[in-house]
Image: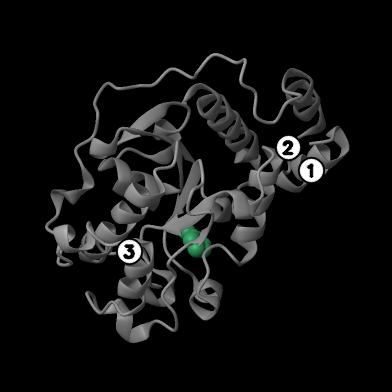
């Protein structure tokens, strides 16, 4: 990406000028292959996220192909969220993407349009991706939940348990080289931990039994409220690039 465009995206992310110059000069290639792979922290590998008994039969969902999975999600009544949803939000992007972004749950805009991250947080997510040379269409974007919790409340454990087989199957079918988990709900559910995002970010985890590398960063909605954290998110995006460069 040309410096000018990259700078525009960094501006949109709110990265300060002195910091932006340093990063750009050190990283002219948006997807460097020469950098050494980021170290993978395998200590304390979390248990697989099926710790809570899923009400959707996991082995049923785990055999579905992409189209059947999409249909299954669209018709899902496994938890009460189906009663209040307008649309299910399956996910969007390239089903063969190297990078899969996983957020929390659809909000009002996403519920209306049936697509994840289409509101203000989605605009910032797009800018974050473009800052590392990726268009929204080049990654796959999904959420922990496929249906909107009313009033945008936090997902309940039983809702997560019922929805998780769908996400797990999506990950199996896409087989991304890296998962980018945005926000507390996503990170804590994927890693089966109560550790705050601030302590999960900055290193490479592994997602359950798949062993797929997973990087945690702040949710774009949080970054909109706390722009002073954007520099840390930028560091996380650099870790994404380094890890993608090292995982083949
Ligand atoms: N926040 C999320 O976590 N996901 C969306 O799809 C929209 C907002």
At horizontal 63% and vertical 40% (from top left) the residue drawn is 230
- SS state under label 2: loop
* Quadrant of res 210: top left
Would you say the residues marked 2 and 3 are in contact, meaning their CB atoms lie under 8 Å apart? Answer: no
Estimate the spatial distance between the alpha carbons at disc 2 and disc 3, rounded to whole Å. 31 Å
Q: Position of residue 202 (x, y in %)?
A: 48, 27
Estimate the spatial distance between the alpha carbons at disc 2 and disc 1, rounded to whole Å. 6 Å
Would you say the residues marked 2 and 1 are in contact, meaning their CB atoms lie under 8 Å apart? Answer: yes
| Colour mapping | one colour
* Quadrant of res 187: top left
| Residue placed most toward the observer, 188 or 61 | 61
| Residue placed most toward the observer, 90 or 15 | 90
Would you say the residues marked 1 and 3 are in contact, meaning their CB atoms lie under 8 Å apart? Answer: no
Give me the disc on residue 226: none
At horizontal 32% and vertical 64% (from top left) the residue drawn is 155
Give me the disc on residue 15: 2
Q: Which residue is mark 3?
A: 155
Estimate how packed mark 1 is, as few (under 14), some (14 to 19) or many (20 or more) residues with alpha carbons within 10 Å. some
Q: Position of residue 33 (x, y in %)?
A: 61, 21
Q: Is 17 on the left-hand or right-hand side of 238?
A: right
The numbered mark, 1 or 3, whose residue comes first in the sequence reads 1
At horizontal 72% and vertical 22% (from top left) the residue drawn is 27
Give me the disc on residue 11: 1
């Amino acid at each position: 990406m040309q410096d000018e465009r990259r700078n525009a995206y960094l501006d949109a992310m709110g990265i300060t000028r002195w910091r932006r110059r340093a990063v750009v000069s050190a990283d002219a290639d948006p997807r460097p292959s020469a950098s050494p792979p980021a170290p993978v922290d395998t200590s304390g590998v979390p248990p697989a996220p099926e710790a809570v008994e899923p009400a959707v039969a996991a082995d049923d969902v785990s055999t579905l192909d992409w189209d059947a999975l999409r249909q299954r999600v669209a018709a899902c009544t496994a938890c009460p969220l189906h009663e209040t949803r307008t649309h299910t939000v399956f996910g969007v992007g390239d089903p063969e993407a190297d990078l899969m972004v996983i957020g929390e749950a659809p909000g009002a805009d996403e519920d209306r349009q049936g697509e994840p991250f289409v509101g203000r947080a989605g605009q910032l997510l797009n800018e974050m991706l473009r800052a590392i040379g990726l268009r929204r269409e080049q990654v796959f974007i999904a959420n922990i939940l496929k249906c909107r919790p009313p009033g945008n409340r936090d997902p309940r454990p039983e809702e997560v348990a019922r929805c998780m087989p769908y996400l797990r199957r999506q990950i199996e079918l896409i087989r991304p080289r890296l998962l980018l988990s945005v926000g507390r709900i996503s990170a804590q559910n994927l890693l089966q931990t109560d550790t705050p995002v601030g302590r999960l970010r900055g290193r490479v985890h592994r997602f359950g039994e798949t062993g797929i590398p997973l990087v945690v960063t702040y949710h774009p909605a949080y970054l909109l409220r706390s722009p002073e954290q954007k520099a840390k998110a930028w560091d996380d995006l650099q870790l994404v690039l380094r890890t993608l460069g090292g995982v083949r």
